[in-house]
Image (cartoon, grey):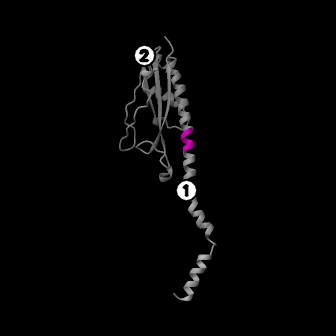
Amino acid sequence: MSLRPKRRLEALRSDERAATAVEFAMLVTPFLALLMASIQLSMIFFAGQVLQTAAIESGRQLMTGTEQDAGATQQQFRQAVCNNAPIIFTCANIMVDVESTNSSSYSTLNTVPPAITYNAQGQPTTTFNYNPGGPGDIVVVHAMYDWPIFGGPFALGLANQSNGSYLLVGTTVFKNEPYT
């Protein structure tokens, strides 16, 4: 090796002018991924709490017999849940499952939300129950929403559904009042 290329290599090795740029380039990608995941996780927790509140507020309509006396359908009750949810949700994507039992034991009621299946376009194909029960019945209401996950590989495995979304579930369990 001639003397000139050897000096250039030694000079390059000791040159520290771009060290900060290289270090920044190495750290910015994981930092941005962590920042995006934190923001997204915060939004998921916030939206989940809002959906839980909407489920509780709407469940009160069933508990007092207002919806049953009005002869409300599943679609009308889903609209009631939507009306109690703020603008962060798309009403057409809210899913509602209502089950009841006339048993006096809460242990006979299934409180697990229904498994949701999706078609090739990523739309839910599950048929949901709507049985609001009568006076004195025990009722469980599940309000569900597919929360979109953004960020691709930076999402860090936040999606829990086959269509790449995160399923938010708000659940309330109560005993209907003895309305007439």
Occupied quadrant, residue 17: bottom right
85, above or below 3, in the image: above
Magenta stretch: dominant secondary structure: helix
13, above or below 111, in the image: below
Coordinates of residue 121 in the picture (x, y in percent): 38, 44
134, above or below 4, in the image: above
Instruction: Give whichever of 54, 14 is nearer the camera.
Output: 14
Give the Cα separation between the discs numbered 2 and 1: 53 Å
Coordinates of residue 26 in the picture (x, y in percent): 56, 62
In the rendered image, residue 100 lying in the magenta stretch gets the answer no
Instruction: Give whichever of 171, 86 is nearer the camera.
Output: 171
Mark 2 Cα shell of 10 Å, populated few (<14), some (14-19), many (≥20): few
Confirm whether residue 125 shows in the render: yes
Instruction: Give whichever of 103, 165 is nearer the camera.
Output: 103
Three-letter code for the amino acid on which mark 2 is drawn: Ser
Q: Which residue is mark 2?
A: 103
Residue pushed farthest bottom?
2
Coordinates of residue 92 in the picture (x, y in percent): 46, 35
Coordinates of residue 109 in the picture (x, y in percent): 43, 23
30, above or below 97, in the image: below
Q: Residue at x 58, y 60 (%)?
A: 27
Residue 177 disc label: none
Segment colored magenta: 41-45
Q: Which residue is mark 1?
A: 30
Residue pushed farthest top?
180
Q: Is label 1 in a helix, a strand or a loop?
A: helix
Q: Looking at the image, do the residues carrying marks 2 and 1 touch, with CB atoms under 8 Å apart? A: no
Q: Is label 2 in a helix, a strand or a loop?
A: loop
Three-letter code for the amino acid on which mark 1 is drawn: Pro
Mark 1 Cα shell of 10 Å, populated few (<14), some (14-19), many (≥20): few
Instruction: Give whichever of 141, 14 is nearer the camera.
Output: 14
Q: Residue at x 35, y 44 (%)?
A: 120
